[in-house]
Amino acid sequence: MSFGIITRAADGSENFRAEGQTLRVIHHQVIQSSFTGDVQVSGVTPANAIAYCIPRNPNPYDRGLLTVMGDGFVRLSRYNNSYPPKTNLDLIVLAIL
Amino acid sequence: MSSFDFVVRNSAGQALAGSDFLGYSLVQEGSVVVVDQQLARINFSTTIKSKAPPIVAIQVRQYGGAWIRLCRVIGVEGNWTHCVLVGNRFSSSEPASVTYMYRVYAAEARSSESYGLRTVSDTNIVSFDSGFKQLVFTSFAYQWQGWPKVVDGNAPAGNNRVTWVGYRNPTLNVPPDGWLALSLANNSFTTTMESNATGKWQTYPMEVESTFVYESGRLIILFELYAATTAINYNIQFNTFCPIIEN
């Protein structure tokens, strides 16, 4: 790189340079496990964003919601109606900007 | 983003850092032993107080025949405490226990003690600190192709029958020192499938778990499908965007 910014740690190792890409949180919403449908998130596509759900339940085996990124939205769906009711999940959308 | 402030962009004009740009920085790294079908845990040395969950990345070098099928951050907004992982090996001839290198990136930078460059947002959050390695990726897996790896599991019919389905990225070459942001993957979810095992087509619930595999420089997603009978008609949708961290 001929110009730009580079930062280094005290030991001289490189921590950052203005190359590559990074992710930024552009949407964070708490939803309930019964939620299905589309969440509108402007500017996202399957090529520049990723969405995922984390159940707010300490049981690590609890299933999350299926998230699929579309153009400008995230589609959420779940089939199993026996999932604990009123469980909250964090919906996170990260994107390259 | 405000019209004036400190912003760093790459050659494509994409923002990489800035005073109101809440990106991710490295807050913890180490090693963890992951055993097949058992729960392993990475405790965060300090509770991560960001609103969004941290990202946990695993170095692909240790993959091969031993994989991780679950990588989940535990906690709530402002109080993320640890990450859990479950190992998964495809056959008993592969190692039952593997030591993986991991990294934890948090969405709110901390202040380092050293001198350098630090930016603070208008909400008084440290958005960039040169004392911490920033999450930057140089490639990502996006296009996946079906891979001829469909194997019906050995579980008896009618009792959580397991089918394996694989997709691979045919063009992306992932270096063994690369890091995979595993906690972002859609690890497990419930969907439906169809089967006529009873002589009549019926819709059944199907549990899906995804496992990332690294084989000869290529990234593979392997899905385990759990259903009461052999899955026949199904449509698995999953996160297709998978960043590879190389710095």
Image: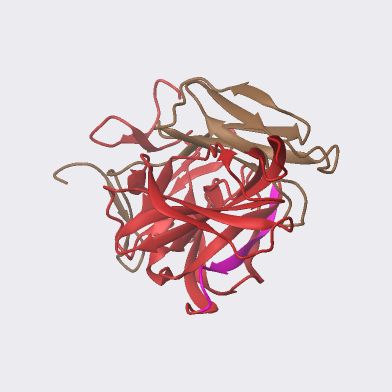
Q: Which quarter of the rendered picture does the N terminus of chain B lie within?
A: top left
Nearer to us in this view, B216 or B31: B216
Q: Position of residue B29 (x, y in %)?
A: 50, 66
Identity of the residue drawn at 38% across and 33% down: B6
Q: Which residues are magenta?
A: B77-92
Which chain does the red colour mark? Answer: B
Nearer to us in this view, B154 or A61: B154
Q: What secondary structure is the magenta-colored segment mainly?
A: strand
Q: Tell me the quarter of the picture where residue B242 sits.
A: top left
Which chain does the brown colour mark? Answer: A
Location of residue A70 with respect to A56 vertically, above or below? above
Is residue A60 one of those drawn in magenta?
A: no
Identity of the residue drawn at 39% across and 32% down: A47
Render colour scheme: by chain
Identity of the residue drawn at 69% across and 63% down: B156
Q: Position of residue B47 (x, y in %)?
A: 67, 58
